[in-house]
Image: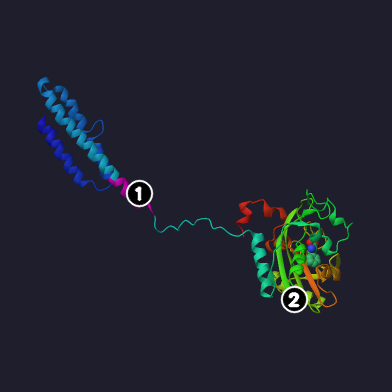
């Protein structure tokens, strides 16, 4: 019996030398370690040996079994590793991570700012919580102007009755703050967030962004304003874009105009975005009203200026081809990822 065990051990050791991968290791297991394998056969034979020899043979056989099992486990780990390494296909394309990007509205913002700063405009900012004086009075809004109504403006509960606080309804109050502090010539753009108490729809939000522009110097003309707007629009929308100046009214500019661009969606045929007109309003503009200059301590006899204001989300709709302004702020990555 001892010889048999010794032979089995030798045979096992020879086998080990031939194990070179998972398959040959499996052959080793099938030969020695399964129910019908060599070791179990020897264990079965143990029944037939005389009682007094059982402890000796039993011990030898157990040592062998332990040795065989441990050796097998070690080899298994070794070949499993090799197998894993082989599984890596180095010819596969690499996995790329998610790349972050600026929000489409922020991208348009940056582009507009750089077009205007290239033309010599400086960037200025002002507070989003304004007072009635800067948002309305100084801009020549009469005290009964409908824009001052609670239905149009978000007022903030405040202890002052004479100059109520509100969320600014446009970026024009920043014009006032600049003209109050800086003597002409002034050539600024004022990007920022504005608020209006409006019903939310495919075209309008209660919270959106504008870029205001202001140029004040001696003998500033409407022709200069027009030229600046045309240069901007061509850079922003391409040389072939169609736009028109339409006479309009703002309390703080005289004369005033609105700039329309032909609707990107229906190409002028009329749709829900352009309310069937074929045109989309993108900016208001005009020659700064003399009262506004005077309110800020600038002599309107000596100086004149032009101002303009763009709604950024409108511009972003035109550039991205998105048909509903609300998509910009629903944070649906399927939409945001496209830009
Ligand atoms: N403030 C105006 C608006 O919000 C836009 C505008 C700015 C018009 C400057 C004329 C000049 O509608």
The numbered disc on residue 185 is 2
Between 70 and 267, the one lying in front of the other is 70
Q: Secondary structure at mark 2?
A: loop
Where is residue 68 shown, x and y percent of the image? 21, 37
Task: Tell which circle, 1 or 2, labels the residue nearer the N-terminal end.
Answer: 1
Q: Is 108 inside the magenta-drawn segment?
A: no
Question: What residue is at 80 percent from the left and 53 percent from the top?
Answer: 164
Q: Is residue 53 left or right of residue 78?
A: left
Q: Which residues are magenta?
A: 78-88
Name above or below for residue 237 compared with residue 74.
below
**Which residue is pictured at 17% across the width and 29% down the height?**
42
The label shown at residue 84 is: 1
- Residue at position x 24%, y 34% in the image: 33
Q: Quadrant of residue 211?
A: bottom right
Which tag is nearer the camera, tag 1 or tag 2?
Answer: 2
> What is the magenta segment's predominant secondary structure?
helix
């Amino acid at each position: 019996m001892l010889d048999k065990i010794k032979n089995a051990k030798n045979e096992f050791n020879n086998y080990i030398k031939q194990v070179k991968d998972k398959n040959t290791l499996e052959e080793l297991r099938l030969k020695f370690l399964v129910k019908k394998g060599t070791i179990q056969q020897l264990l079965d034979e143990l029944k037939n040996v005389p009682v007094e020899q059982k402890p000796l043979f039993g011990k030898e056989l157990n040592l062998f079994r332990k040795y065989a099992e441990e050796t097998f486990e070690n080899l298994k780990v070794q070949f499993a590793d090799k197998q894993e390494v082989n599984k890596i296909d180095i010819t596969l394309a690499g996995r790329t991570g998610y790349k972050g990007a600026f929000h489409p509205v922020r991208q348009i913002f940056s582009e507009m700012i750089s077009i205007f700063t290239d033309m010599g405009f400086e960037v200025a900012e002002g507070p989003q919580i304004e007072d009635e004086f800067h948002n309305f009075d100084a801009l020549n809004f009469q005290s009964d102007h409908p824009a001052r109504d609670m239905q149009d403006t978000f007022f903030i509960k405040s202890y002052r009755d004479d100059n109520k606080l509100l969320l600014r309804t446009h970026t024009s109050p920043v014009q006032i703050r600049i003209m109050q502090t800086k003597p002409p010539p002034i050539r600024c753009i004022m990007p920022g967030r504005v608020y209006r108490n409006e019903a939310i729809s495919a075209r309008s939000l209660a919270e959106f962004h504008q870029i205001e522009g202001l140029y004040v110097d001696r003998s500033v003309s409407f022709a200069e304003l027009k030229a600046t707007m045309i240069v901007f629009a061509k850079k922003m929308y391409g040389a072939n874009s169609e736009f028109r100046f339409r006479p309009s009214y703002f309390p703080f500019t005289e004369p005033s105009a609105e700039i329309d661009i032909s609707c990107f969606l229906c190409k002028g045929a009329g749709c829900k975005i352009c309310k069937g007109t074929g045109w989309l309003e993108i900016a208001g503009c005009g020659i700064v009203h003399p009262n506004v200059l005077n309110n800020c301590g600038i002599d309107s006899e000596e100086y004149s200026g032009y101002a303009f204001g763009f709604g950024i989300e409108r511009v972003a709709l035109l550039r991205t081809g998105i048909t509903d302004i609300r998509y910009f702020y629903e944070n649906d990555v399927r939409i945001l990822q496209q830009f």
